[in-house]
Image (cartoon, rainbow, N blue to C red):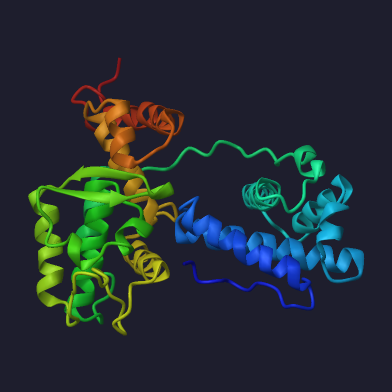
Amino acid sequence: MAKHFQPVSSLVLDQQVLLVFKSWQDWLFNERKLSENTRMAYLKDVGAFFCFFSKHIGSNISMMSLQQLTIADLRSFLADRKRSGLSNTSMARNVSSIRSFFYFLNKFGHLKNEAINLLTSPKIPQAIPKALDKDEALSILEKPSSTTLQPWVKSRDKAIFALMYGCGLRIGEIIALDGSDIPLSDAIIVNGKGNKQRLIPIMPIIRDSVAEYISLCPFTISKDGPAFFGARGNRLNPGVVQRSMRLIRGSLGLPTTATPHSLRHSFGTHLLVNGGDLRSIQELLGHASLSTTQRYTAIDTNYLKEVHQKFHPRAELKE
């Protein structure tokens, strides 16, 4: 059963809505099988909506008030979020979260409110991910995040970045690995978004990085426990990985676009540059839609131009 997240007090929700909200959490966990990060984002978004709507109507939220919710109320919420500085991307997720909650209410016979069908998401510009070049990516793998870190922490970070660049794994997928997933063999089964599994080949150099971390890790790696630990012996937090990348980025003079996720993007881009086909890259990255992977074709064109100008023997010759 999902651990219930309580974003609002009983002063905002009446008892019936509170129980339905908890049931929705269980449904997201057991039926939708959303990742923990996505689930928490949905819960926080709907919690923010509850807080706004309670103030908006001047009372706690009941099933009746949810039934009487209008499109004007929903638009007022989005306008309030916009004034608070939320990006269009975050606001679009807010809309998805609220839709999910009202879909649940309708599906299980609690109530049906057509106003939710009139709500539109803000337009989101299609961002093309920024890939690192090969030398930049390799320099991150070779550079310890800090000279003051313990050897096992340095080896942990190196192993994580190797899995991102060498296998295209997401931060969440790496942190979710258990002891039963290692030592690594020639391939690893990864549970990605939507609990979809995919098989990823493991190169020897990646196995060696992970094996070095295992040999230095001071904590017992059990079958059902985390594979990657934080300093206090708990499952590693994504923020720690992001902080390590910022330290490395600063010491190497890399741009702010050099993030943990950019290593994953670089994995896909470099495969494409070297002849990989989109369908295979889609499978390796765990993209649900080929259209997501097709963004890499735009990256590929720019990347190839840069490589040509930098390395082609005739690039420096004047016409």
Give the residue drawn at x 22%, y 55%: 162
Q: Name the residue furthest right.
A: 58
Is 286 left, or right, of 74 in this rendering?
Answer: left
- The residue closer to the viewer here, 24 or 9, is 24
Give 197 or 142, whichever is nearer the viewer: 197
Q: In this view, does 22 lie above or below 98?
A: below
Residue 63 visible here: yes
* Observer-nearest of 317 and 309: 309
Q: Is residue 34 left or right of residue 250?
A: right
The furthest residue to the bottom = 232
Q: In which quarter of the image is the C terminus?
A: top left
Residue located at (82% from left, 65% from top):
62
Residue 194 in the image: x percent, y percent? 43, 47
- Say above or below: 1 vs 264: below
Residue 143 visible to an observer of this rendering: no
| Residue 299 x/y as whole percent | 40, 32
Q: Which of 146 and 35 is in front in this view?
A: 35
Residue 73: give x, y in percent of width and height. Answer: 86, 52
Q: Where is residue 29 in the image (x, y as percent from the top left)?
A: 49, 59
